[in-house]
Amino acid sequence: MAAEEATSKVVEALHDLNVQTVVSIPKLGPFDFSITNAVIYLWISAAVVFLFFFIVAKRLRKEPEAMQTFAEILIGFARGHLTGQIGEKGRKYYYLILTIFVFILVTNLVGLIPKPFALKPYTPTANINVTFGMAIVVFLMTQFQGVKNHGVRGYMRSWLLPPGVPKAIGAPLNGIFFTVHVVGEMFRPLSLSVRLFGNTIAGHLVILVMLGLILEFSSAVVIIPAALFIIIMTAFEIFVAFIQAYIFSLLSVIYIEGAIYAGH
Amino acid sequence: MDPETAKNLAAGLGMGLATLGPGIGIGYLTGRAAEAIARQPEASGDIRTAMIIGAGMTEALALYAFVIAIILLFVA
């Protein structure tokens, strides 16, 4: 097979960069509200998360069955981390953290289901827009908690040196501190979103590179190891889906904690 | 060197070089965490959490380069 043809097939198979429009809606200025397979997979994962907890909540029992046990593990996990990091104050944020964890887990896994409908499989978290949206929610929550717990002035002051430093040294240092802190604060949603996006898409790309090798050299010497590698990578991706959901929710907890106890 | 070649080279080389640092970092981190767990198995939960946070932070560095490589290859 010609190299060009193989490359175009790989690009075709590159479903995570290849968004398929299902219902096209005319553009509203710079915004494109067309319904693509990415949007549909997001809806599916949201529905799965909602229905799972809805059904579990409807049939709560004293002796839990499989679904309730799983839900209890997830809730206990989110609660344990929050109270472990933030203390008793953190108990009320577990709705957010639990939702983030379960939603990212489901979105990571939903794209691994091979072609359930006429739609192309798509992992919503392999799209930077989705992950950045979630990171912005965490960012806003962090800033909100900082302002709520310390007031605007108190929160700003927590970014500076502690009081009692002589003015002559304090003023220039404070400027540097403030700038570094603002930049750091701005980079947090970026690093959160890029971490999740990169991890998800990197696994898919490695699999696609292997697929490309199979298409390029159609001989058993290449196909057998490449196919084995694809199977191992897919298993590894399931593992990564869990780890990334865990890291995202854990870092969100740590950021919120930092805002609540700013200046300590 | 024509621009297309330069782009491909930059993406490949950049990605490879960017994995060096985080590779060393995560290796060191995991080794130290294993040591700490061996020394104090009862604290393994906390150590594991700290390790995963650190690994996540370190890994992000390679992922920045990865995103730039993707931009070079598919977008720019």
Image: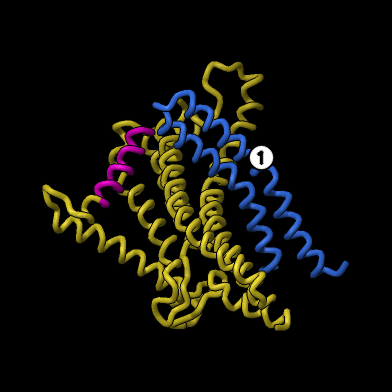
Chain colours: A yellow, B blue
- What chain is tagged by disc 1? B
Residue at 37% x, 34% y: name it: A149
Density class for disc 1 (Cα within 10 Å; few <14, some 14-19, many ≥20) is few
The quadrant where residue B13 appears: bottom right
Q: Which residue lies furthest to the left in this view?
A: A62
- From the viewer's perspective, is residue A24 above or below residue A42? below
Which residues fall within the magenta stretch? A70-85
Q: Determine if residue A88 is in view.
A: yes
| Residue nearest the observer in this picture, B44 or A164 | B44
Q: Where is residue A94 in the image (x, y as percent from the top left)?
A: 31, 44
Kind of residue sitting beneath label 1: Ile
Q: In which quarter of the image is the N terminus of chain A?
A: bottom right
Q: Determine if residue A143 is in view.
A: no
**Residue A204 relative to residue A98: left or right:** right
Please give the residue where the numbered disc 1 appears in the rendered image.
B24
Residue at 55% x, 41% y: name it: B55
- From the viewer's perspective, is residue B32 above or below residue A204? above
Q: Where is residue A167 in the image (x, y as percent from the top left)?
A: 61, 19
- From the viewer's perspective, is residue A82 above or below residue A23? above
Q: Which residue lies furthest to the right in this view?
A: B1
**Magenta segment includes A242:** no
**Residue A214 relative to residue A86: left or right:** right
Q: Where is residue A63 in the image (x, y as percent from the top left)?
A: 13, 48
The quadrant where residue A241 appears: bottom left
**Magenta segment includes A84:** yes
